[in-house]
Amino acid sequence: MKRKTVLRSIIASTTLLSLTACGQANLTTTTTVASEPATTTVTATAPERDVNYVDSEPAEYPVFYENSMKTGDAFYALAESENSLGFDGALWGVPEDGINWNTEEYDNIRENVFKDVSTSPLSTFSADVDSASYSNLRRLINSGYTLKEIPEGAVRAEEMINYFTYNYDGPEGNDPFGVNAEISTCPWNSEHKLLHLGLQTEAIDFSDTPDSNIVLLVDVSGSMSDENKLPLVKESFSLLLDNLSEKDTVSIVTYASGVNVVLEGVSGDKKDKISEALESLRAGGSTNGTGGIDEAYRVAEANFIKGGNNRVIIASDGDFNVGKSSASDLSKQIKEKAKKGIYLSVLGYGMYNYSDTRMETLADDGNGNYAYIDTLHEAKKVLVEELGANMLTVAKDVKLQVEFNPKYVSEYRLIGYENRALNNEDFEDDTKDAGEIGAGHSVTVLYEIVPTTEENSTNGKDLKYQTSNLTDEALKSNDWLTLSVRYKEPDEDESKLLEYEIGSNYYTDKPSEDFIFSAAVAEFAMVVRNSEYVADGSLDHIVEELNTIPLKDEYRREFATLVDKVNL
């Protein structure tokens, strides 16, 4: 029997945190071609049980939660009646026409490799605070996908790690970041070390942020009619309204076959008026995403607040089928607006036709955040609990560069951030775009390190055309590495440089709870991707690691249930 986490007794409570709005068909996804439909049928046998929320539970659930709550932690089992997608029978059933209509799109990701410090001493990449990959992966797992069926492109390790909060020290003095570091034995390869870096900005309550000009851009095309799409969008934005006041303005733009301005420049304290406008939205027609983005920016410019938070928030499944629809064409439309101070954040919804590729690209080029909303509880996390971080940018174009000292480090591998890689020369080039960090955001970075030994040291091993002697500074130093961070103030175009030396004093044989947990998430990402670098890592090993630490918040406890779910 597989060993489970000590949390099995509370799975019923944590399961509700990840009840997906889409657990209705198990159709294997690939990046470009729909696969053969699954034929396995699963029957619910778990008894009905009382469910107690770990934290607090939403006051009301949308329709698609009903079957889930009835079956407790077996919510992914058989449906009693026809569901909202028009499928009969099992939640993982096949459409009556026998055709798999799954067209979900994910970018192919080539996993980072180990690099030799003697030839590649610098590692340069853009900061990333997106979290969509984790919540989307949660949706896939809770919908019944096996590890083999999960598209590799859906697994972005950095977004999974950064989904969670860590007990980091905040900034000191005038620095925008607090920098945290820890080095210990790598959990999945005892011959290697693991470096944990964490940047933390100061949290700000949304009520204390500058005035906001928010344009809600809502996809109301026919593909958004399912219960886990437009109905969930409306409930999500209703949560957002509770945090707005008279200092904020709200506009609503919709797009389907055409474009419609439902509301423009309404004060944030007119909650009834905004709620009525949201409730009036209905789905139907094709998807003129390009026209919707154009109109949303027009409205945002008309209500622009100088020195304020000007932001378009798009809610969609990413299925644009009218107008320019390539990711590159759409990106060009929003880059200039971002430079003028109107940012674009992206909330993804739904399944089957979901375009993760397009949604991530739009958010990146719009200097905004990208989150995937699979439940009302996730909407609360993004639009209530983390509203200040997701709405107020405190540092833009944030770049990180790590220089490793070959005295201590022979090879290194950056875990994740594959699509955030920069050329080393881009670090000092202020024209190169990079990631944004909000108030209260943290950025977590993990490196797997091969320590330098007598056997693998290159010191003194000269080649014909170059030498490999270490500098006196390297030989005398206790530094394992130097972390350099470049960033710009939100309203400035010239970057500032911060440098932090990470030395032997950061090494420990007793890693912190944050170190162990973040490593478990990274290991899980590698197991799901079937990484060649997972070494001794496994689902059972992740369970063992999680059982060594208290899981102090609901999201960490939920992660443990996901590991259990695929480790049956």
Image: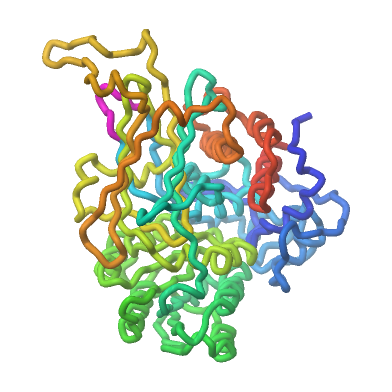
Residue 355: percent from left, percent from top: 45, 59
- On the rendered structure, is 534 left or right of 409? right
Q: Which residues are magenta?
A: 114-122
The correct choice, above or below, for 359 with respect to 291 in the image is: above
Residue 132 location, x and y as percent?
50, 55
Residue 364: image quadrant is: bottom left
Residue shown at 31% from the left, 42% from the top: 499
Q: 100 or 29, which is in the foreground?
A: 29
Q: Does residue 236 appear to the left or right of 477 in the view shown?
A: right
Q: Is residue 39 visible?
A: no
Q: Quadrant of residue 130?
A: bottom left
> Could you tell me if residue 530 is visible in this image?
yes
Q: Considering only vertical position in the picture, is 287 above or below 88?
A: below
Name the outermost residue toward the left.
465
The answer to whether 468 appears left or right of 54 in the picture is left
In this picture the colour scheme is rainbow
Q: Camera-side residue: 413 or 332? A: 413
Percent of width and height locating residue 272: 59, 90
Please give the name of the residue rendered at 31% of the width and 79% of the height, measured from the top-left corner. 306
Looking at the image, residue 550 lies above or below residue 408:
below
Looking at the figure, which quarter contains the C terminus?
A: top right
